[in-house]
Each structure stands twice: as C-alpha cells, then as structure tokens.
Image: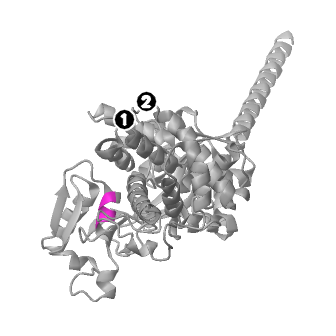
Amino acid sequence: MLLILLLLGLAIAGASIALGYRRTKQKEQGTLYARRMALPDTLRVVTLSGATTYFTYRDEEMGYQYELVKLMADSLGLPMTLHIAPNLEAIHNLIDSGLMDLSITPEAVSGTGKQRYRYTGLEERSGLVLVQRRSSRQQGQQGMYVSNVTQLLGKRIHVPAESRYEQRLLNLEQQLGGDIDIVALSDDTINSEDLMAQVANREIDYTVVDQELARLTKRYYPSIDIKLEIGFPQRLRWITSPERVGLAEAIDRWAEQAPEVEAYKQLYKRYFEEEQTEDSQEPSSKPYDWRGEMLHLGAGHLSPYDALFQKEAPRLGWPWQILASIAYQESNFKAEIIGWSGARGLMGIMPRTGQSFGASKAELLNPVVSVRVSVDCLLATEKYFRSVEDVEQRIRLTLAGYNAGVAHIQDAQRLARKYGSDPNRWDGHVEEFIRLKSDPKYYTDPVCKYGYLRGRETYKYVREVMARYELYRSKTSTAAE
C-alpha cells in the first residue's frame, strides 16, 4: 500500500513538473511570438549612399528610398534613425546581428535571399536600358533610333569596361549572332551618369545603364530616350530579418496602400518625372552662349534686383555682379520660384538654411530677405576656406560649397590630396574630384565622409556662375564708361 502511494505521489509530481514545463515553454513561445510581432520603439534603418537611396544636398537629406522610408515610418508612427553603411556586406551583417531593423537599399528577390532575409515594402522592377537621343526618332535619322534589340548589331555603344553592361552586350552578340561595336572604357573616372550626359550632348550615340538610375537621371536630360530594355528586369525590395515578422507585415500593409496616397504620388513625381527647376539647361562641355539672356537688359543693368546686390555685396567683399550671376543661375531672376529640391526664391535658399539665418519659408520668397540670407550663407561658407590664399580660388570653392554643401567640397579636397592634386585649388584640381563624387569608387573611399553627390552639377555650377560674372562685369563696366 505504501509503495502504491509512493508511486502515485511520484506520478503526480512528475505530471506537475511536466505541466509546469509545458506552461514555461508556452510562456516562452508566447514571449518569442510577441517579440517577433512587435514593432520596434525606434526603427533603425540602414542603407548605402547613392543617387536613388540617400545623399545630402545643401546640407539637406535626400534620396528617393530615404524619403520613402520616412513616409512609411511617419505612417506607422515610428521614430527613425539612419545609418550609412560602406557596402552590402556591412548591411547584411548589421541586419543579421539585429543592430539594424531594415535595409532600404533595394535588393533583387531571389531564392537564396529568401532563406536569409524577409523581403518587404514596395516592389520595384529594374533592368538594363539603352540610352539614346529622342531626336534620332523625331528627326527621322535613318538607322539611328533603336526600337528593338536586333537593331543593336553594328551600333557603337560606350560602356564602362568589365561592367555588367559590357557583359550583357557580349551576351547579346552571342544570342543575336552578330557584332555590336562595344567601346569598353577603362578610364575609371567615367561612370554611367557621365555617359548619359555624353549621349545628351551628342558626344556619343548610345550607352547602357541601370533602369532606375536612368529614370532618375533623365530629369536632367529630357532629350534622352530610355524606353528600350535590353535585359530581364529584376524584382527589387527592402530587406529585414526573418525574425521581424510584425515589422515586415506592417510595412507590407502600408505598401499595399501607398501608391494611392497623395504624398507618395508627389514623392515619386518629384524624383522620377519632374525636370529640375534649378538646373534647366542640360550640362554641356561647349561654351555657353550668354548673348540671349542679355537681350532684355538695359544699358548697365542686369536685373530688377541690382540695387539689392550692390547693397549686400560689400559685406562679402565680392563684386556685386557675382551675386547677380548666382541669382540668374538659381532662379533666372524669378523671385517666387521653388525648385524640386525645395530651394526657394531668388537666390535658391534651402528652408533649413533660411531658418538658421532667421528666415521662414515664406520670407525666402522675398528678394530682400533672399539676398541677405544668401550673403550670410556665403560668408559662413567662405570661413571654411580661409586658408586658401588665392582669392579667385577661394571664391570658386565658396561657390561650390554654396551649391553642394561644404561637407561635399571637403570630401573632394580630401580626395584631391589623396590622389596628388592641390586641395586649395578649385580649377583643374578639386573640381575634378567633386565631379567624381557620383562614382562609387570615389564616394565610398574612406577619406570621403559624406557619400554620393551628383558632382557634375556643382562642377558646371561654378563654371557657369563665373563665366556669367565675367560677362556681367564687362557689360556694367562698359556702361559705366
């Protein structure tokens, strides 16, 4: 009897232990499930710097993917932090370790990727496209316009050497059974954006680039055509850890509705459909013909705002005609203009810059305020280049900083120093490295701290402002005589 009672007690104890174990496991599983489904208190976002992901312009944070994730985070009510990684491997390590929640550098959806990550967010499709001039079609130039891949045979196409663009053209030669005149450029200072500019400027006839980059860059070159796809498009999405189930599902629910949201439509339009207001002329290596812009001016006068420029210029110690040239470059002397990037008014002031100098968004559309803030900004920028003894070079560096932001110019100076150029000389030195800041080889260099910049615009900006200044000075000096 005693033995039976003992065995019964052991059985009851065992059952209690088993029940407790099951309850503990269920609790742990419930905790794990809750953790997997919970949204983070703060969304930790990681990305690469680049034309379509994230960059700074005039000290403002920009980039289609960056602004898109901000839109999403605001919709979900999540505070957000951003980390810029040097490469994809670093991004993957940060996601794997749980140090970052979400990567917004779109990656191709693949079976291998699905085993490691959870794809989430809006799906994009991007492949390779041929870049050519629309005028070839509109003007009926025989054999120039390419409407299907078979017409690539015999065409001379410029691409970076050892790139996937070159490889795709080589594969097409095999598939089509003929020769394409492939010009593989080994010069590592030439990148896809440069080649697109060369097509627009009639220096070359064709190149091949990524579709997403082509769509973004086309805003600067409305004369180019990017309709012909020459490779199968890839499905691209953001990635997160497979443990972040709740986050991924919340992002996917947002993504289903996003295309119908007005804020998303405006964002997409701004990056991929509108032409840049601040930079309406296409970049060109040819001398600009300024005569046309001078026809409406009376003797000795440059604009309705000459008196403002003359009043503010002494604070800066520059000829007032430089301020006039900046104003034309930024706004064509249109005081109430608002550019695609948010730059406002006669002198193209960014709202954050205006705020730091005591001007509201609305006030920046007032020419008096705009010129005053412009000079304040130029004075603040010039301080970073006080060590430059050559006045002309200091002015050019300051203009470059005004256009792109001082941080990018300092990056270009560090690159110039590293590669044996003079960091205190803009002409032929720093200007060459600011142009290279759109090339991953250079903007991911360890000495380059502020990432991607569409540097050819700053390169062009300084040249055009100074060339116009010389013309303006000549015109006003002649009138004074």
Image x and y of residue 304, in percent: 60, 67
Query: For residue 225: magenta?
Result: no
Q: Is residue 147 left or right of residue 366?
A: left
Q: Is residue 6 left or right of residue 456?
A: right
Image x and y of residue 168, in percent: 25, 62
Image x and y of residue 74, in percent: 72, 52
Of the 4 image quadrants, the one containing the C terminus is bottom left
Instruction: Report the amino acid beneath label 2.
Output: Ser
The magenta segment is 194-198
SS of the residue under disc 1: loop
Task: Give the residue displayed 40% in from the left and 59% down from the top.
Answer: 464
Q: How is the image coloured?
A: one colour
Q: Specify which label sits upstream in the sequence, 2 or 1.
A: 2
Looking at this view, is 48 or 399 the one in front?
A: 399
Q: Are marks 2 and 1 in contact (CB under 8 Å)?
A: yes
Of the 4 image quadrants, the one containing the N terminus is top right
Task: Give the residue displayed 54% in from the left and 57% down from the top.
Answer: 64
Classify residue 267 by image quadrant. Answer: bottom right
Residue 424 bears which disc, if any? 1
Residue ID for mark 2: 387
